[in-house]
Image: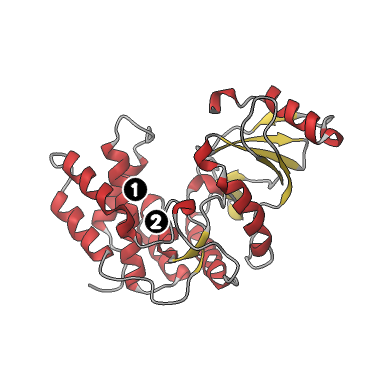
């Protein structure tokens, strides 16, 4: 499906359903995500189209949840403007959002990494404090982010079996066991669900917006901490730890989330990790628990 989502398709969808925007230029964004394809619509808008049926539910969820979060968090988040219906051979609902300027962390050459660690930690702290009563409980729609990491226990064991001659399986099992010894003891809080370098925008080297809330919900916020191992290093990691707060048992579950993603990605080779990001993350996960004690 993703190969058929073209500029011409977007123009046809806009012309057929939102003709008042039909004169605006359409162009694809330079760096595309996995779940959706995104196109600029003029200077102020963006069109976002799910790349497969499994990502369709996120359109409705974001349209419902993003207005709840705007004003509750210290940085801009996407603002839904309109929802399109299936047409022109495209079978899914799609959305129009306000365009948020900035460069993703993965593409920005001038990121202040320590400041990013601090700012991201503060953003996640404010996100957790947002009223959660109307938020969707974690589950299948969030790909089980916000649930207990044991939801992916079978995948961890399967990956360790495939990688038994490649990774330190004993060390991995020890990390995983620690992740399973606790659960979120408080009322559910908001989580983003996919805090990653492609979903964080920067301006002038500083975090300026957070995008792609398709896996958001309310539950255990441990899943939002995995950048401690996938991006931050050394002192940056500790700055993130302090800014994001949360007790050590939450960070142990977060380490389990990072371990799961690294293992399933490495086990799927050749797969969607051309730059060995998850291979390096696995090394960091095993080396640094990011907690204050044993």
Element under disc 1:
helix
Is 153 situated left or right of 108 in this image? left
- Residue 143 in the image, given as x and y percentages of width and height: 43, 51
Is 288 situated left or right of 204 in this image? left
Sooner in the amino-acid sequence: mark 1 or mark 2: 2
Which residue is depicted at the point 69% across and 30% down? 87
Is 224 situated left or right of 251 in this image? right
Q: Is residue 260 visible?
A: yes
- Residue 263 in the image, given as x and y percentages of width and height: 27, 45
Marks 1/2 in contact by CB < 8 Å: the verdict is yes
Q: How many marks?
A: 2
The residue that label 2 is drawn on is 226
Which residue is depicted at the point 40% across and 61% down? 147
Element under disc 2:
loop
- Residue 189 in the image, given as x and y percentages of width and height: 50, 69
Instruction: State which quarter of the image contains the N terminus.
Output: top right
The residue that label 1 is drawn on is 261
Which residue is depicted at the point 70% across and 22% down? 8
Badge 2, how many Cα within 10 Å: few under 14, some, many 20+? many
């Amino acid at each position: 499906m993703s190969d058929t989502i073209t500029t011409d398709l977007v123009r046809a969808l806009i012309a057929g359903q939102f003709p008042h925007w039909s004169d605006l230029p359409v162009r694809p964004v330079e760096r595309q995500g996995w779940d959706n394809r995104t196109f600029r619509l003029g200077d102020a808008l963006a069109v976002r189209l799910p790349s497969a049926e499994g990502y369709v539910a996120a359109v409705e969820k974001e349209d419902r949840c993003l207005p709840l979060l705007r004003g509750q968090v210290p940085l801009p988040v996407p603002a839904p403007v309109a929802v399109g219906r299936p047409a022109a051979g495209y079978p899914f609902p799609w959305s129009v959002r306000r365009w948020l300027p900035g460069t993703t962390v993965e593409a920005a050459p001038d990121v202040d990494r320590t400041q990013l660690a601090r700012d991201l930690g503060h953003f996640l702290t404010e996100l957790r404090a947002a009223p959660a009563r109307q938020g969707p409980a974690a589950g299948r729609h969030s790909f089980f982010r916000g649930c207990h990491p044991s939801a992916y226990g079978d995948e961890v064991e399967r990956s360790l079996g495939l990688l038994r001659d490649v990774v330190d399986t004993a060390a991995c099992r020890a990390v995983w066991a620690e992740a399973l010894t606790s659960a979120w003891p408080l009322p559910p809080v908001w989580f983003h669900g996919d805090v990653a370098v492609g979903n964080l925008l920067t301006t002038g080297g500083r975090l300026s917006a957070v995008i792609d809330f398709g896996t958001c919900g309310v539950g255990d916020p441990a899943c939002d901490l995995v950048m401690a191992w996938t991006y931050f290093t050394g002192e940056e990691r500790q700055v993130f730890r302090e800014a994001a707060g949360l007790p050590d048992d939450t960070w142990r579950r977060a380490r389990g989330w990072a371990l799961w993603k690294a293992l399933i990605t490495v086990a799927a080779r050749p797969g969607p990790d051309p730059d060995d990001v998850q291979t390096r993350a696995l090394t960091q996960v095993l080396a640094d628990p990011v907690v204050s004690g044993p």
